Image (cartoon, rainbow, N blue to C red):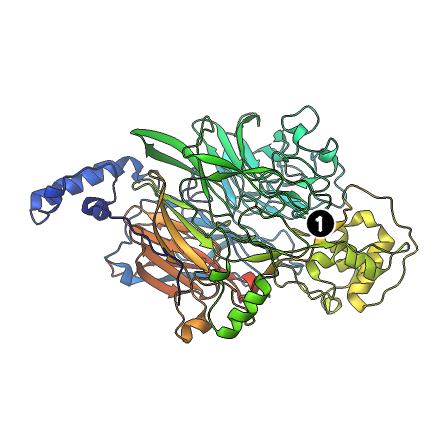
Amino acid sequence: MRWPKPLYRLENIPLHQYSFAYRTINIPETIMKRLRLGIAIGVALAAALFVCSSQAQQYREWKMFGGGADNIHYSTLSQINRENLRQLEVAWTYDTGDAFPNSEMQCNPIIVDGVLYATTPKLRVIALNAENGRLIWSFDPNEGKKALGKMRNRGVTYWGNGNDRRIYFSFRRWLYSLDAKTGLPVKSFGREGRLDLLEGLGRDSQGLTITITTPGVVYKDYLIVGSMVSEGLPAAPGHIRAYDLRTGKMRWIFRTIPHPGEYGYETWPKDAWQYIGGANNWPGLVVDQKRGLVFAPTGSAAFDFYGANRHGDNLFANTLLCLDANTGKRVWHFQAVKHDVWDRDFPSAPALVTLKRDGREIDAVAQITKSGHVFVFERETGKSVFPIEYRKVPIDGVEGEKLAETQPFSLLPPPFARQILTEEMLTRRTPETHKAALETFRKLRSKGQFEPPSLGGTIVFPGYDGGGEWGGAAFDPETGLFYVNSNEMAWILRIVERPKPKALPSGKSLYESNCASCHKNNLSGTPPEFPALTNLGKKYDASEIRGIIRNGQGRMPGFSSLGSEALQAITRYIMSGVDNITESAKSKPSPIEMKYTFDGYNKFLDSEGYPAIEPPWGTLNAIDLNKGRIVWQIPLGEHPLLAAKGVKDTGSENYGGAIVTANGLLFIGATNYDKKFRVFDKLTGKLLWETELPAAGNATPATYEVNGRQFVVIAAGGGKWGAPSGGSYVAFALKRDGN
């Protein structure tokens, strides 16, 4: 196996830092060499305890997504440590019973007063006894109906004031407020316990889809939320909104696609605010509670891969926004990708970190990217902690496109993912796979970041799922180390001309114009992300299929604008292959009907279905944010069939983040195919312990304490990219007779 150099980087960590991991302690090396002396040990331990005492209470709970208000995935719980890891065992398992083919669970559960709150593959909300995993209550917003496709959710939000304690979560277009004790809707919130996210968008919402996949954040009496919307047109705008926690009344809104007179309006065509969608905060937000600042990263504008109808830089798409949490007013912003046509969304909520640079402490916000970069800014001013360089990039896009001439690059820390795919990096697993990969590669454009999409095909590397992804990063405030798991997958972006419908469109031509870019001309799709539509009529009746086409679901937009006859024709074609001509004439051209689309989400794979590039295909990285350098980098995950043949430590695609503890441990599932849950030494990257889950743990774990016992829990949902699906939460703890 040939590895790119360098794969594994480990800086020389002083003994005193390795042993105690407290960067604020400066114990002389001469003393450390005399550790055999009891007095030296006593002094060191006393100093260590003093340093962490102020943080001990702050990081002992897991009451919100990412662990705490700063979203650093960090805990000071120390019962589980390097010495007793061998005694770690399954403490309890809760099977939701909700798994179905291709279903997923991405939920980072929260634990409040001994109760664990989470969601299931069918988006039921459950409350479990966090000590034994027994069900306390369950709320089913779908009222027992069968699931119409995959639904994603990364967690819920908790708020409490006296006896008023609530859980907030979103199901399709509805934002619910539940009583945390009973699981019943709080009738005083919105209308009968829920509010409609389509309301208040500032445009006609017919045919639009919207939901919330990553939980909102609480600030004072506000619940601040982003949204997930369609990535094709028509799409809802991705405005960020704050609601009253008690009543559901909207308190403020920040329009990410500016209206006339608003900051950034001139970076779009003059009427774009009426028809362009996206620029949405789907990966979540973070609030600096002390300063009253909310940090919201956004995604690309729709349509993702061709922007002839949105010339300009497109603020505030692909932007880290800093807003006043009290009013929603912009404080500062940083746009990482101008006029995005590569689906380069910010993939996760940022982390609020405190660094040491040039002898001073800096309260900063750290944001990972799909491209493998980390941007770090001072929270109050938006000043970059590390240098950013604006470089000229290629602008030779397809007809009608107008790309930005420069794009920003973070110079430090160095990228945690490879930045350009070359011939030398293609797979050599077998001579046959190398030859086939080389033939395909030589037909494509591959010149690094921001290479324009093309008719012949352009390599996007790292791919649409990163680099960094929605699991986010973990940060250790003691050492300044920032942990990011990363994908190393190449994708092929190919622009194609949108088929022109006939004067009197048929079901087939309507399908080819509106559906085939994701589901393919032959209805085969790109499962499981974009399911095959063959034999769909055996699963759902015509009204159900027509309803999904009309209203949309998840990332799929609604197509109500086509009219009822066209919807019937598409439904008939999908169900039976019958290509009846509709009687309705083609509607007049609109700004969302463009000449080009793309040919779907295509990974660059070899003939046997493995990545067509040399490993690693996934990594775990430790980055020193104080110095802006990578400390270590290791492959994360394996493909079991290859490992059985002796091809091990290849790394694999991974989804879901890590958590880090004060006493030296890093816990992570994430790996898509081997279903492993692993514990690493946070300072060296050495594997300390691993086990196999019922399904892949494509979620960020949580750690908590109940009745003096520390638990680590993770959702085992699988289902990503064809991996087997599951529906269990698995909690680990030390054996009862352990230390």
The residue pinned by badge 1 equals: 557
Residue 505 in the image: state x and y as whole percent.
87, 56
Percent coordinates x, y for residue 543 in the rendering: 79, 59
In the rendered image, the residue lying farthest to the right is 583
Judge left or right: residue 45 versus residue 593: left
Left or right: residue 260 versus residue 472 is: right
In-image side of 191 versus 160 (left or right): right
Q: Is residue 563 visible?
A: yes
Q: Residues within 10 Å of mark 1 (few under 14, many from 20)?
A: many
Inspect this view and state whether residue 98 appears. Answer: no
Q: Position of residue 59 (x, y in %)?
A: 35, 41
Give the structural element (helix, strand or loop) at label 1: loop
Amino acid carrying mark 1 in the image: Pro
Residue 325 vs residue 379, the one in the foreground: 379
When asked about the image quadrant of residue 588, the answer is top right
* Vertical position of residue 256 compared to residue 154: above or below: above
- Which quarter of the rendering shows the N terminus? bottom left
Residue nearest the observer in this picture, 326 or 248: 326
Residue drawn at x 21%, y 45% as measured from the top left: 14
Query: Measured from the top left, where is residue 370 in percent x and y?
Result: 51, 48
